[in-house]
Image (cartoon, rainbow, N blue to C red):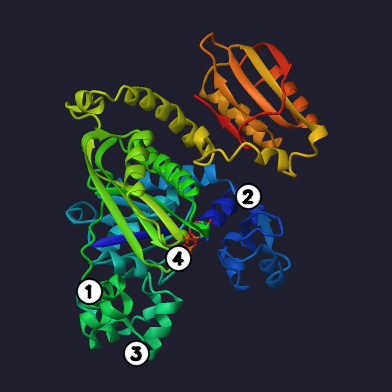
């Protein structure tokens, strides 16, 4: 049997736990600007029809007394880690699928923790006792039904779909509840008189594939209670991927390459976090007409640096002749091996790949920043936008107000933390430029933007972040010729 565990109103519940004045009140976790949307709503707020992704102004209209709490992703990520830790005390087969949900394969655990429902109860109790948070749990023989079941008795519920109840459950399950069935598909389902998942069985698999593509054959299998997906732990996981649907369709190859770079960094980061190396890279492209292609490449060496993944992704991308605009891009890696396997050293540094080692160390530095400040914090310099843009950028101000200063900071300032903090402040002040370490132990930075802001930045540099011990700061005005309109960490 498989459990699907999903925390109740996760971000909101953490906030209500940590601030008693918020308990039993309608609260939303969200930004407070006109364009903000609700991350999540407490169950009290949901009574007013408020839900995730709803614009905040609408939430306020529905419930004028709603309390808006700014979110704290680091806090939620830390809670998530604790939750996963508690769950893994019950089974070694835990697959975390989002910040607040996980699948657990409980085969072999019955002797220790009793039948599935009682084990689910024990997990709920452990999470509540240790963290004062509630969750809902679905139990079923297959992943797909376990996930649906966890949502059936929210909050704080347990729902069991035993093997002999699977069939009647599928017969009555509204088709709209099946993950992946979107609005367009639903329209066609209505024409075909498909109201429940059971109704799918009335149609031949070929017809379903013609009408719904890949999803057609998947629905056919699900309607028969077949879902072969296993609970994949870090060790059994067969691939790691990251994809992004673009805010608008693109045709420009440079933009596509920049996105592939960012995706390679994300995938590389996850791969290294799991202490794995891989020898297969895949890219996925969905076009504006929703058709999709994937291209894979098996490589003859083991890699884990973002740069090596990117290199392979670009090779694959450049072989594609673009005829349609791109709607979605994805990068994936597969064919894993444990990084600490004995063959690692020879394989990681293949002859001729002199830069591999350098990139490994760059990746380590980047990873530690990502861990600390989130994945958007670091972008490779080549992700910068073209140089002229900064002159035209209204956010920087008029030409006469723009200053560009080279800064040399001496003292105990080298290190990832110093650079990351410098970047953080520069971004807050809306400055472009870069920061990098120099071999003599100092840090070199260039700040470009509003004169007032550049002055403030230099003021900050004189103190630096805590424990950095800045001795002195040399500044030198330079012409405005920065090649970036963001603030980057260079290597
Ligand atoms: N989340 C978000 N934006 C969304 C959806 C979710 O930021 N559009 C965040 C906030 C949620 C968390 O992810 O707390 C988990 O998402 P869930 O879909 O599991 O929603 P909740 O846990 O908040 O509520 P539920 O009790 O329905 O699971
Ligand atoms: Mg949840």
Q: Position of residue 310 (x, y in %)?
A: 37, 39
Between the C-alphas of marks 1 and 2, the distance is: 46 Å
Residue 1 falls in which quadrant of the image? bottom left
Q: Position of residue 457 (x, y in %)?
A: 72, 26
In-image side of 37 versus 191 (left or right)? right
Q: Residues within 10 Å of mark 4 (few under 14, many from 20)?
A: some
Looking at the image, tell me whether mark 3 or mark 1 is earlier in sequence order.
Answer: 3
The reply to whether the residue tagged 1 has its Cβ within 8 angstroms of ligand 1 is no
Between the C-alphas of marks 3 and 4, the distance is: 26 Å
- In the displayed structure, 12 sits above or below 410; it is below
Looking at the image, tell me whether mark 2 or mark 3 is earlier in sequence order.
Answer: 2
Look at discs 2 and 4 and give the one toward the viewer.
4
Identify the residue shown where x is 31% and y is 80%. 211
| Mark sitting on residue 221 | 1
| Mark sitting on residue 19 | 2
In-image side of 225 versus 250 (left or right)? left
Between the C-alphas of marks 3 and 1, the distance is: 18 Å
| Mark sitting on residue 438 | none
Question: According to the image, label 4 marks what residue?
Answer: 288
- Helix, strand or loop at label 1? It is helix
């Amino acid at each position: 049997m498989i459990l699907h565990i999903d925390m109740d109103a996760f971000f909101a519940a953490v906030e209500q736990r940590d601030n008693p004045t918020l308990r039993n009140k309608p609260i939303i976790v969200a930004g407070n600007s006109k364009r903000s949307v609700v991350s999540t709503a407490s169950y009290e707020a949901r009574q007013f029809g408020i839900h995730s992704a709803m614009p905040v102004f609408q939430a306020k209209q529905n419930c004028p007394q709603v309390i808006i709490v700014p979110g704290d992703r680091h806090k939620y990520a830390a809670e998530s880690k604790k939750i996963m830790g508690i769950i893994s005390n019950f089974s070694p087969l835990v697959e975390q699928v989002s910040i607040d949900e996980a699948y657990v394969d409980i085969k072999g655990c019955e002797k220790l923790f009793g039948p599935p429902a009682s084990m689910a109860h024990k997990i709920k109790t452990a999470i509540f006792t240790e963290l004062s948070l509630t969750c809902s749990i679905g139990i079923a023989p297959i992943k797909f039904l376990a996930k649906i079941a966890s949502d059936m008795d929210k909050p704080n519920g347990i729902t069991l779909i035993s093997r002999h109840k699977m069939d009647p459950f599928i017969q009555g399950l509204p088709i709209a509840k099946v993950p992946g069935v979107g609005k367009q598909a639903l329209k066609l389902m209505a024409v075909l008189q498909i109201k429940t998942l059971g109704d799918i069985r009335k149609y031949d698999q070929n017809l379903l594939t013609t009408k719904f593509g890949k999803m057609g054959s998947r629905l056919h299998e699900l309607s028969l209670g077949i879902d072969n997906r296993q609970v994949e732990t870090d060790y059994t996981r067969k691939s790691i991927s990251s994809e992004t649907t673009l805010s608008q369709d693109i045709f420009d190859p440079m933009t596509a390459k920049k996105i592939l770079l960012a995706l390679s960094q994300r995938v590389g980061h996850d791969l290294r976090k799991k202490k794995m190396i891989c020898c297969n890279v895949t890219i996925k492209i969905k076009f504006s007409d929703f058709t999709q292609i994937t291209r894979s490449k098996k490589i003859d060496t083991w890699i884990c640096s973002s740069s090596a993944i990117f290199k392979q992704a670009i090779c694959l991308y450049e072989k594609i002749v673009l005829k349609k605009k791109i709607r979605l891009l994805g990068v994936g890696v597969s064919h894993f091996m444990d990084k600490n396997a004995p063959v690692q050293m020879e394989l990681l540094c293949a002859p001729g790949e002199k830069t591999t080692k350098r990139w490994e160390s760059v990746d380590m530095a980047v990873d530690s920043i990502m861990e600390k400040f989130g994945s958007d914090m670091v972008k490779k310099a080549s992700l910068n936008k073209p140089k002229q843009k900064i002159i035209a950028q209204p956010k920087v101000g008029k030409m006469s107000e723009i200053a560009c200063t080279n800064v040399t900071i001496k003292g105990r300032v080298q290190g990832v933390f110093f650079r990351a903090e410098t970047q953080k402040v520069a971004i807050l002040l809306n400055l472009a430029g870069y920061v990098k370490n120099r071999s003599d132990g100092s840090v070199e930075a260039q700040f470009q933007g509003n004169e007032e802001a550049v002055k403030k930045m230099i003021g900050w540099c004189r103190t630096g972040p805590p424990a950095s011990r800045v001795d002195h700061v040399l500044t030198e005005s330079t012409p405005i010729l920065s090649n970036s309109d963001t603030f980057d960490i260079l290597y």
